Image: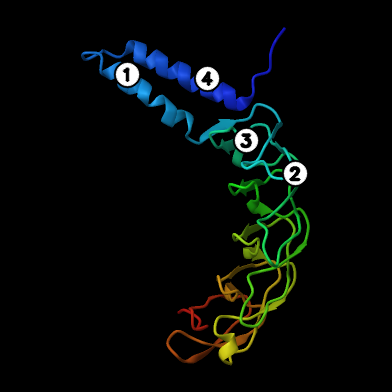
């Protein structure tokens, strides 16, 4: 009768067997070389590893997480920690996950089959691709941004509080660049384009939905055409 051996144990066994094979074939210098090689074993067993999956495989994200296992796609690479739990991989089906919890985030997100996901040490998703248009919070700013709708089929990145720092807009969206509280107005960013947010919740960069007059890093006003990607400095000026 065959016995199923968990992936994490298979990896550790193969590393251990490989080390003993190497040690048995290296010349010994007064008995020092072989023990030195074998001393590497604990460090190697504790290292992260990667594996190509032969079939769709249910595996635990690192830290387990409250959703249990996720199904990872055959023929793709998974990165695992020393416990055989997944740090990153490609999903075999749509998967409900938790971003990191925070004051503005207590919900779940559904990620898209066939796309990559990365988990933090607590099994919370920190990057992934949305399976559907999803309303999420960016970091809070001087003027609260409120929620933003991010587009299905596009990638998002979460910070340690579960707030979106990078995402793609599902609709034209009004956001505030840095220093907006000092008197500068809001900016409308274009549907289907990527926006970034600063740690203070300001729009750090994005693509304009309409012609917009903005202050440049040279201190002068300039008219930027619709469809232009703009990047703001910490004073809310467009870097040129």
Q: CA distance from mark 2 to mark 1?
A: 43 Å
Name the residue that disc number 1 marks.
35
* Mark toward the start of the polypeptide (2 vs 1): 1
Q: CA distance from mark 1 to mark 3?
A: 36 Å
Give the residue displayed 27% in from the left and 18% down from the top: 33
Name the residue that disc number 4 marks.
13
Determine whether label 1 and label 3 are within 8 Å by CB.
no
| Vertical relation: 7 (above or below) 172 | above
Name the element at disc 3.
loop
Give residue 88's position: percent from left, percent from top: 60, 43
Name the residue that disc number 3 marks.
76
Give residue 196's position: percent from left, percent from top: 59, 68
Name the residue that disc number 2 marks.
67
Give the residue displayed 52% in from the left and 83% down from the top: 236
Eye-nearest disc, 4 or 1: 1
Eye-nearest disc, 3 or 4: 4
Q: Residues within 10 Å of mark 2 (few under 14, many from 20)?
A: some
Q: How many marks?
A: 4
Determine whether label 3 and label 2 are within 8 Å by CB.
no
Q: Residues within 10 Å of mark 4 (few under 14, many from 20)?
A: few
* Mark toward the start of the polypeptide (1 vs 3): 1
Name the element at disc 2.
loop
* Mark toward the start of the polypeptide (4 vs 2): 4
Determine whether label 2 and label 1 are within 8 Å by CB.
no
Give residue 66's position: percent from left, percent from top: 73, 45
Give the residue displayed 48% in from the left and 33% down from the top: 46
* Mark toward the start of the polypeptide (3 vs 4): 4
Q: Residues within 10 Å of mark 1 (few under 14, many from 20)?
A: few
């Amino acid at each position: 009768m065959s016995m199923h051996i968990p992936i994490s144990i298979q990896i550790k066994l193969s590393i251990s067997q490989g080390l003993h094979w190497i040690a048995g074939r290296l010349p010994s210098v007064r008995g020092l070389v072989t023990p030195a090689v074998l001393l590497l074993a604990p460090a190697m067993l504790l290292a992260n590893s990667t594996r190509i999956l032969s079939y769709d495989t249910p595996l635990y994200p690192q830290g387990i997480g409250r959703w249990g296992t996720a199904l990872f796609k055959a023929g793709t690479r998974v990165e695992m920690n020393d416990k055989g739990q997944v740090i990153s991989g490609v999903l075999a089906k749509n998967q409900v996950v938790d971003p990191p919890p925070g004051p503005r985030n207590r919900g779940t997100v559904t990620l898209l089959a066939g796309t990559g996901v990365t988990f933090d040490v607590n099994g919370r998703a920190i990057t992934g691709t949305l399976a559907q248009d999803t309303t999420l919070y960016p970091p809070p700013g001087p003027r609260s941004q409120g929620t933003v709708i991010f587009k299905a089929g596009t990638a998002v990145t979460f910070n340690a509080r579960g707030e979106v720092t990078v995402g793609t807009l599902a609709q034209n969206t009004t956001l505030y660049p840095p220093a907006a509280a000092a008197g500068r107005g809001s900016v409308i960013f274009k549907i289907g384009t990527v926006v970034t947010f600063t740690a203070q919740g300001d729009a750090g960069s994005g693509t304009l939905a309409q012609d917009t007059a903005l202050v440049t890093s040279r201190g002068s006003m300039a008219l930027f055409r619709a469809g232009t990607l703009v990047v703001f400095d910490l004073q809310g000026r467009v870097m040129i």
